[in-house]
Amino acid sequence: MKVKSRNQEVVIFIGLTKWSEKYLKLKAIPGKRLALKVHKEDPYKVLCEEAIDKWKAYNPDLYSENQTYVLLLDSGKEAVFLPGTKK
C-alpha cells in the first residue's frame, strides 16, 4: 500500500507575460518559461518567492527589483494556491 506524502513535490512552469495593447490582454513571451519543483502544499507566498528566486537566477536581464511579480494561472487569474489543493 502506498502512502501519499502530504508535502508531495510537483513541477510547475513559470514564465513571463506582458500586456498587449493590440489584443488588450496579457500575452506570454515565447521562450521565457522555466520548470520549478515545489511542494504541493506550499502557501502562495513560498511559491512566489521560489519562482522569483529561480527567475532572477536564470533571467536576471528580465527581472527588476522595482516591479511587483505575481503568479498567474494559464487563464490569467492570480494563483492563490495550486489547482487541486485547498491551501
Image (cartoon, rainbow, N blue to C red):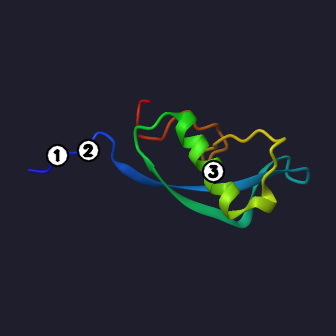
> Who comes first in sequence, dot 2 or dot 3?
2
**43 vs 20, nearest the viewer:** 43
* Tag 3 secondary structure: helix
Residue plotted at (72% across, 62% down): 59
> Who comes first in sequence, dot 3 or dot 1?
1
Residue plotted at (64% across, 43% down): 72
Residue underneath mark 3: 53
Residue plotted at (33% across, 42% down): 7
Q: Position of residue 58 (x, y in %)?
A: 67, 64
Q: Position of residue 8 (x, y in %)?
A: 33, 47
Q: Which mark is residue 31?
A: none
Q: Position of residue 20 (x, y in %)?
A: 86, 52
Q: Give the Cα distance between marks 3 and 1.
A: 31 Å
Q: Are marks 1 and 2 in contact (CB under 8 Å)?
A: yes
Q: Based on the displayed image, in which of its 4 quarters is residue 15 positioned?
A: bottom right
Dot 3 amino acid type: Asp
In the rendered view, does 1 fall on the left or right side of 69? left
Q: Residue furthest top?
A: 87
Residue underneath mark 2: 5
Mark 2 is surrounded, within 10 Å at the Cα level, by few (under 14), some (14 to 19) or many (20 or more) other residues, namely: few
Residue underneath mark 1: 3
